[in-house]
Image (cartoon, rainbow, N blue to C red):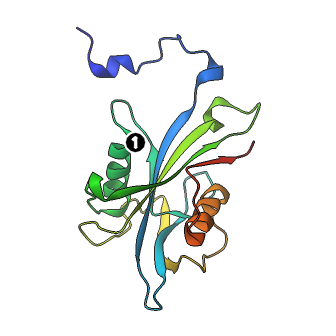
Amino acid sequence: MPGLSDAWSDDGSADHRFRVVPAAYVFLLRPAADGGEEVLLQLRRGTGFMDEHWAAGAAGHVEADESVVQAAVREAREELGVDLDPADLAPVTVMHRGQPGGPALEQRVDVFFQARRWSGLPHTEERDKSAGLRWFPLDALPEPVVPHELRVLQALAAGEAPRLMLFGF
């Protein structure tokens, strides 16, 4: 009997027009001394994508046989060394982004979460992919930030994150 992971293999039944890459992003938030909020960002380095840009503390592709929530919890553990209770993940927005006419790998559906509770002290777990972590006021972000993530952070800071965002269309 085939296992669940067999269901995720590419059997050719989906034309390339219907393929998108799902990903989960986690913004850890904490109260700031001035009464605002701070967000934990990492400086990307050695990844081959948007290196030397600030980005979500934890993010990555949804793997076979896991939900987007499970992916968010896994990425937080793998990248930040923290444990998240799925109940503490609050959806921020879903972003459909892509490059029309571009490669299938650049057709994405990103699910952004925020968390204000976690277990453990956030630290860089993947030193070969990050030049470090830092807390920033949500209303005073560093430069540069990965462009599609910046749009979400700006909406979050404004308190007006829509349920769905488009980027690149």
Q: Is residue 67 left or right of residue 152?
A: left
Residue on which the image places disc 1: 68
Q: Quadrant of residue 14?
A: top right
Say which of 115 and 64 sits in front: 115
Question: In the picture shown, does residue 102 fall above or below 15?
Answer: below
Which residue extends farthest bottom?
34
- Badge 1 element: helix
Is residue 52 visible to us here?
A: no
The structure residue drawn at horizontal position 30% and vertical position 59%, both measured from the top left corner, is 88
Q: Is residue 117 left or right of residue 104?
A: left
Q: How many marks?
A: 1
Q: Position of residue 68 (x, y in %)?
A: 40, 42
Say which of 137 and 43 sits in front: 137
The structure residue drawn at horizontal position 65% and vertical position 38%, both measured from the top left corner, is 106
Image quarter hosting the C terminus:
top right
Q: Position of residue 99 (x, y in %)?
A: 73, 39
